[in-house]
Image (cartoon, rainbow, N blue to C red):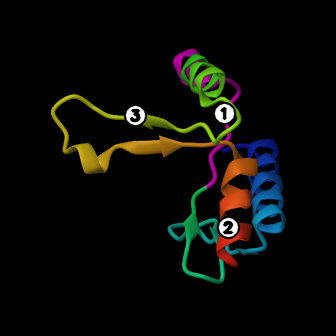
């Protein structure tokens, strides 16, 4: 991995830690960010994410009518509870603030 990519990754980790009020760990093989109430965050940055994710979020937001939009991704053949939830960072932060986390 180039030093430019490592720097970008660290920049993202720092932003996430600050935004969510956590601590950047960033040690190879461990989580990138740890929140005080027990959430561990792995940060990934790519030049481009799959367009279907953005289209799915846009559809969820259109249909949300002022509430939070979530996208659930499920791989065919896997258990439903192993699906992935995608939300906007600002919505996750809102939930954390409401829960007092």
Q: Rounded to the nearest whole Å, what is the CA distance between mark 2 and mark 1?
A: 26 Å
From the image, which quarter does the N terminus lie in?
top right
How many marks overall?
Answer: 3
Determine if the magenta segment contains residue 2.
Answer: no
Nearer to the camera, 5 or 96 = 96
Q: Could you tell me which secondary element the residue under label 1 belongs to?
A: loop
Nearer to the camera, 67 or 13 = 67
Residue 39 found in image quarter: bottom right
Type of secondary structure dominating the magenta stretch: loop
Q: Rounded to the nearest whole Å, what is the CA distance between mark 1 and mark 3?
A: 18 Å
Up the image or down, 24 lies above or below 79; here it is below
Tell me the mark number nearer the camera, choosing from 2 and 1: 2
Q: Which mark is residue 46?
A: 1
Residue farthest toward the left in the current orientation of the protein: 77
Q: Magenta span covers which residues?
A: 43-54
State the image coordinates of residue 19 (x, y, percent, origin top left). 82, 62
Q: Which residue is mark 3?
A: 73
Q: Could you tell me which secondary element the residue under label 2 belongs to?
A: helix
Up the image or down, 16 lies above or below 74; here it is below
Determine if the magenta segment contains residue 47.
Answer: yes
Q: Which residue is mark 2?
A: 96
Proximity of marks 2 and 3: CB atoms separated by less than 8 Å: no
In the displayed structure, does residue 93 sit left or right of residue 55? right
Q: Rounded to the nearest whole Å, what is the CA distance between mark 2 and mark 3?
A: 22 Å
- The tag earlier along the polypeptide, 2 or 3, is 3
In the displayed structure, does residue 62 sit left or right of residue 50? right
Tell me the mark number nearer the camera, choosing from 1 and 3: 3
- The tag earlier along the polypeptide, 1 or 3, is 1
């Amino acid at each position: 991995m180039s030093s430019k990519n490592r720097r970008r990754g660290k920049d993202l980790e720092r932003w996430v830690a600050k935004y969510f009020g956590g601590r950047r760990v960033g040690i190879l093989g461990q989580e990138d960010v740890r929140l005080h109430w027990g959430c561990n965050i792995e940060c990934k940055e790519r030049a481009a994410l799959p367009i279907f994710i953005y289209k799915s979020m846009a559809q969820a937001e259109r249909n949300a009518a002022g509430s939070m939009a979530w996208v659930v991704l499920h791989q065919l053949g896997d258990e439903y509870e192993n699906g992935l939830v995608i939300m906007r960072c600002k919505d996750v932060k809102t939930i954390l603030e409401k829960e007092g986390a």
